[in-house]
Amino acid sequence: MVAALGGTLAFLELTGGKDDASSADDSSAVIKKVDEEADPTKLIDVQASDIVSVVVDNSYGGFTLERPASGKSEWNIKELTGLDQISSYKSDIANDLSQLESYKTVEENAEDLSKYGLAEPEATFTVNFADGTERTFLIGDIATKNRYRYFCEKDSKTVYMVVKSIFNNIIDRKEEFVNKFLIEDSSGTDPYGELRVKRKDLGYEMVFVQDESEDESLISAQVMTEPIFANLNISVSAKITHGLYGLTASRCEKIFPSEEDFGTYGLDDPQCTVTFKGEGYDYELRIGNEIHATDENGKEIDEIAAYYCYVTGVDNRDCIWQIDAENLLYASFMPGDVISLMTTNRIENIDTMKVTVDGKTHDYKVVTDSDGQVTNVRQGNDELDVYGFKSLYQFLLSCPTDEIYFDEVTGEPEMTVELSLTDGETETLEYYRESARRTIVALNGRPSYRIESRWVDGFKENVGLLEEGKELKEYTE
């Protein structure tokens, strides 16, 4: 089977595949040539169960693939004992070696093994069999047909070509056998606990918990409680609130790290620490030094490609990992990236809305039918255009919240919006003019955001346009 595959691969390589412009006669000649070159030799012919161990020596130090006497695992990489290993990688080695077959014989009685890379081989491995015997083999250079490697048995001068993919795991780092899947995605079954993000570049922590109201109309089922209380925009916040579920590394960098290793990779004093605790789980993710992307010349650029990380709360993961930056927004996001101004984005949850601006109060009463559709909006005795009021409410939802604010405010608010919801809850938004360009927003009496004053000007203008029955304006950032 391997020989047949090798012949097919060689055919594709020599012909260039189905798009090759060579004639039918040429293709026939190539096929004949490939068939003539194929000269498979069975090098090992046993059952995988007849292999006791494979001892590998390669440029990364090597490893030992063993069949534990305990019987707890089919195969084990001895140096990785205690870590979660990829079973298929280990069984592939045993299965491939038990029926090892060459594609062809290159040279018998070769006097110069160096020309095949076998004088100083890429790797060597010794197969120990159940009958007490052992055989050692050498893996050389990639052959001229680059889908193969030169190969021979120790103390033999017969050189073969063998499909190189068989040796990929033998030549590679033992760390590649470690399972890079770190945290199981149990978001649908685990009750949501508390997610806490602590960063060295911020003077506060960000904390997310489940919203106790469990109202389906909420923008997100989670809320931020620190540094301010805020509801979340689920279109972006899920990557933070649920970002640990299914977390996967791109590379296992260091197994069984020491305290010195933690210092080397910036994990003794991490730039970011994420803790996620709940019923039945307690995870901690430490984010250390950055790994920058490189240009076509191998020179580092400003773009951050990944981070060194360490995870606790999961068994058999005692490693320093590389995790892609796109999966670690914790290291760079700001509260304003994920929060939403409002408790609800559904107008049908509004009972009344009171806007006080320039000393005048505008009271709006929202009426919905049994299907939850808004059928009527009144201001005192006046009936307003429903679509116009929806536009005003949509403008309120568009209030930018990308900059949070903590300091106390003084004076009287320039504008106040009071919302009474159908479930009896209330919300109050107060807008304090800080300057011609900036306004502070206090949510339920607590300073929370700094926004552009032009948004306030736009909202006030739309209040007047609604009363006049004119088309309202949209806010553009």
Image: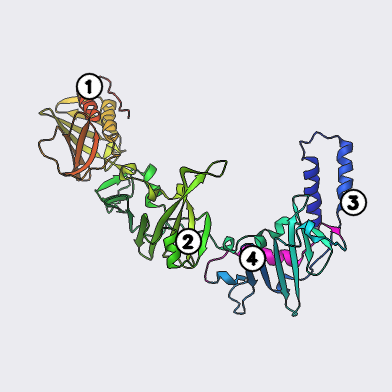
Cα gap from disc 4 to disc 1, whole angstroms: 71 Å
Please give the residue where the numbered disc 2 appears in the rendered image: 320
Distance CA(mark 4)–CA(mark 3): 34 Å
Q: Earlier in the sequence, mark 4 or mark 3?
A: 3
Residue 330 appears left or right of 140: left
Whether 360 is among the magenta residues is no
Going from the N terminus, do you reach mark 3 or mark 2 first? 3
Instruction: Point out the tag, 1 or 3, that comes first from the N-terminus.
Output: 3
Residue 90's tag is 4
Give the image location of residue 72, x and y in percent: 58, 75
Protein image colouring: rainbow
Q: Between tags 3 and 2, which lies in front?
A: 2
Q: Amino acid at mark 2?
A: Ile
User: Circles 4 and 1: CB distance less than 8 Å?
Assistant: no
Local packing at callout 1 (Cα closer than 10 Å; few below 14, some 14-19, many 20+) is some
Q: Nearer the viewer, residue 378 or 342?
A: 342
Instruction: Please tell me which residue is depicted at 30% across the width and 28% down the height of the picture.
Output: 475
Image quadrant of residue 92? bottom right
Question: Which element carries disc 1, helix, strand or loop?
Answer: helix
Q: Position of residue 152 (x, y in %)?
A: 79, 64
Is 169 drawn above or below residue 446 in the view shown? below
Q: Position of residue 442 (x, y in %)?
A: 18, 41
The residue indicated by pointer 1 is: 465
> Which span is picked out in magenta?
82-107
